[in-house]
Amino acid sequence: MRILLVEDEPHAARILAKGLREQTYAIDVARDGEEAVYQAGVNAYDLIILDAGLPIKDGFEVCRELRAGGSSVPVLMLTARDAVQDRIAGLDLGADDYLTKPFDFRELLARVRALLRRGPVLKPETIEVDDLSVDTRSREVRRGGRRVELTAKEYALLEYLARRAGEVVSRAEIAEHVWDVDFDPFSNLIEVYIQRLRRKIDEGRGSRLIRTMRGEGYRLATGHDGTDS
């Protein structure tokens, strides 16, 4: 999942970005409100973590502009302000959740997971596709009951495919949601990671779950659900 972190304090931004990346999220960082609005307009994010006290445009104005522009991306607001009226203002402007500084990083992660599960249909914490199980809370993957060891980026790619199970997911969509703004669209990195996943998930199994749909993208499907192009 790709997250936009909007935080103007450099040390806090580095610490939060590092912690979130260690949890397999792809993170872009914006340093002020104007940059946040721009980044949200040109990139597809699954979540925005938005500090309220920002230069140029504060978090409340950013949230208002995003919602006025039709953006429905979940917004988690962070602020040192703990007054009830500030929380009400943020929520009324379109924020989905509110966390007051200082906070425990574990609580931030729990709120991030909760917001990412939301949507037209509530997403379960454990995603099951055929005999593959992906626990989005513990980041544990099992195939046929046996644990599969994955790197952070391998897990991030698999979770994205699992959340879209049965759908054809394009290379561009994978790049937008699994990698950050520094991803080189001309590299073969996605293909490399797909092959790594296949070796760990499908090799030696009676059915293949990771399918290549030639000219379209990839699909995570049940063992009897169609064939590769």
Image: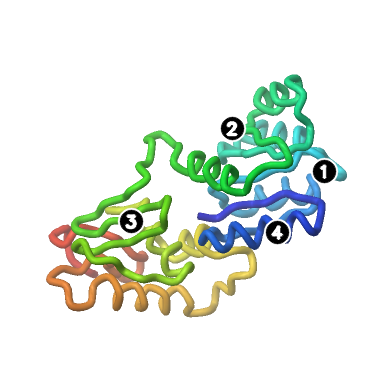
**Taking 131 as reference, is 91 left or right?**
right
- Mark 4 vs 2, N-terminal side: 4
Tag in front: 4 or 1: 4
Do the numbered discs 4 and 3 sit on residues whose CB atoms are within 8 Å? no
Q: Position of residue 129 (x, y in %)?
A: 24, 54
Give the alpha-carbon distance from disc 2 to disc 3, as whole Å.
Answer: 26 Å
Which numbered dot is residue 15?
4
Q: Secondary structure at mark 4?
A: helix
- Disc 1 residue type (three-letter): Leu
Name the amino acid type tagged 4: Ile
Residue 115 falls left or right of residue 203: right
What residue is disc 2 on?
96
Give the structural element (helix, strand or loop) at label 3: strand
The residue indicated by pointer 3 is 134
- Alpha carbon of mark 4 to alpha carbon of mark 2: how far? 23 Å
Residue occupied by mark 1: 54
- Taking the spot 35% from the left edge, 78% from the top edge, the residue there is 195
- Lower position in the chain sequence, tag 4 or tag 1: 4
Label 3 environment density (alpha carbons within 10 Å; few <14, some 14–19, many ≥20): many
Picture quadrant where residue 192 is located: bottom left
Three-letter residue code for mark 2: Asp
Q: Quadrant of residue 17 in the image?
A: bottom right
Question: Residue 194: x percent and y percent?
Answer: 37, 73
User: Relative to residue 21, is residue 149 depicted above or below?
Assistant: below
Mark yes or no: residue 213 visible.
no
Mark 4 vs mark 1, CA separation in Å: 17 Å
For discs 4 and 2, the disc positioned in front in the rendered view: 4
Q: Which mark is residue 123?
A: none
Q: Is residue 11 above or below residue 192?
A: above
Q: Earlier in the sequence, mark 4 or mark 3?
A: 4
The structure residue drawn at horizontal position 39% and vertical position 70%, both measured from the top left corner, is: 150
